[in-house]
Image: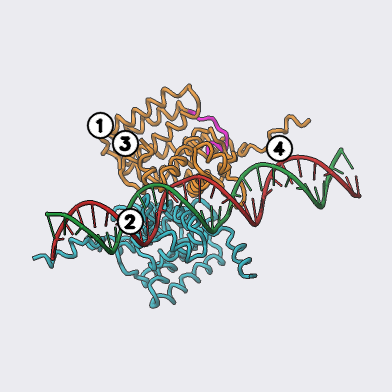
Chain colours: A cyan, B orange, C green, D red
Amino acid sequence: MAGEKRSARSEGDRVAGICTALRRAIIERALLPGDRLPEDSLGERFGVSRTIARHALGQLAAEGLVDLRRNRIAVVATPSFEDARDIFDIRLDLERQVVRRLAGKLTDAQARQLKAVVDAEHGARHGPEGASIRLATEFHVLLAEMTGKPILIRYVTEICYRAGLSLAAFGRPHSSDCAVSEHLDLIEAIRTGPAEKAEAMMVEHLEAVASRALLQSSGAKPRDLMDILAPYAE
Amino acid sequence: MAGEKRSARSEGDRVAGICTALRRAIIERALLPGDRLPEDSLGERFGVSRTIARHALGQLAAEGLVDLRRNRIAVVATPSFEDARDIFDIRLDLERQVVRRLAGKLTDAQARQLKAVVDAEHGARHGPEGASIRLATEFHVLLAEMTGKPILIRYVTEICYRAGLSLAAFGRPHSSDCAVSEHLDLIEAIRTGPAEKAEAMMVEHLEAVASRALLQSSGAKPRDLMDILAPYAE
DNA sequence: AATGCATTTATTGCATGCATTTGTTTTGAG
DNA sequence: CTCAAAACAAATGCATGCAATAAATGCATT
């Protein structure tokens, strides 16, 4: 009874709660591109009516994480290869702004907070892949949050989630080792180095992530039925 | 023209219709920051139930055009001065990408299409301010659409609308004359010039727009009732 | 006359119900 | 036995109703 009251109050908006849960499920690859998201099931699972579930799906569709077609069951979005490229291009610009604004201005407390996330990444590097990816994303989001600029934070967050989904769309395993050391280097560069150097390092990092995931798999992206069956056709 | 892709992206056609109408009202300054948007009135005006109106408000809130607080009437967003700066910073990066991709690759048909919009701007320069601003925005959106990159188009469109709203928040009149000639120069630079030159011109243009609107009015931002009434108070 | 409190009204939050549409199974003809 | 058409099941599209909350108004008290 008290629990009901508390959960209702702490989660001022139930729509936001569902969005958060689904975003996390998507970034952790518990939900994969193409997975169905019926309003009924969502509502039942989260203890709300279809109305609320529907609204949440609308929000996620606006963020590009969900595909919504009229009279059809909502599905987790399946970004195309071109989409993925464009997302990373935009992400590059946005995160470059983040670094430019933080370079040389990181407080010790902030550096510690970032390192804590990287530590968590390190600890999760042999655990389930989902946690690893989520933490890597959290690192970038936290960095953006430290700019204190709400609009920049919002766009960086959104684009990071979309980037994560894009990576999932191509089924590449997440190489956490690289991310961990690159993230550590980034913290140092942002804290001490000149803005140009930190910026260059972020560019390098993101391009590495993108090429590890996208360039290598230029042919293996969407499992096309015809491609899969080609060897069996003769 | 501009609404085709938006309506396909969103779900219910009616939700998209309301969004489009409200976006336009906002960009034309028929709706000003802080104006109330009660679900009932919207529903009645557009011939739909509150459910649909509510959903539309949710979408616009996700785009940053509407402020939605629990149990409170939705209002047109009132971007802060810092928000406006951040929006223009992001817009700069995004539109730079647009120019970079279009430089030297504009077909004659596309150039003609862009010129048609600028002509319309020219024709509207002494008419109502709203049309002038809307057309200036359409120019930038059309440019983005010519990249053929859906994600880039989407972010540029959104940020252009937010920029328009930001300008409205500071009550600056729209100087259409400058925009018209600058837009013409842009078309030429993109069509013929090297990418660097076109890019620099876009940067210059957007910085000019931002400084005309933002820098000059650093003290006159939100029309506060107390401020407005100050001269009458004695 | 100004402030705080109660009452009334306006508005949102959310679930439910019905019509419509889509997807699936069944059925029946060839 | 195959395939198409019809019947069924599942899911969405949307409006409406009721409870809860906030804004507005009026009243009383200082």
Residue drawn at (56%, 44%), measured in percent from left and top? B39
**Residue on which the image places disc 4:** B226
- Between marks 1 and 3 in the image, the one whose residue lies nearer the viewer: 1
Label 4 residue SS = helix
Q: Is residue B130 magenta?
A: no
- Which is more N-terminal, label 4 or label 1? 1
Crowding near the residue tagged with mark 2, few <14, some 14–19, many ≥20 C-alpha atoms within 10 Å: many
The residue beneath circle 2 is: A79
Q: Which residues make up the magenta segment? A: B166-175
**A92 or A162: which is nearer to us?**
A162
Asked where in the image residue A176 lies, by quadrant, the reply is bottom left
User: Does mark 4 fall on the same chain as mark 1?
Assistant: yes
Residue B127 in sight in this render: yes
Nearer the observer, disc 4 or disc 3? 4
Q: Main secondary structure of the magenta part?
A: loop
Residue B190 bears which disc, if any? 3
Residue sitting nearer the eye, B122 or D15: D15
Q: Quadrant of the N terminus of chain B?
A: top left
Please give left or right for residue A185 compared with residue C24 in the image. Answer: right
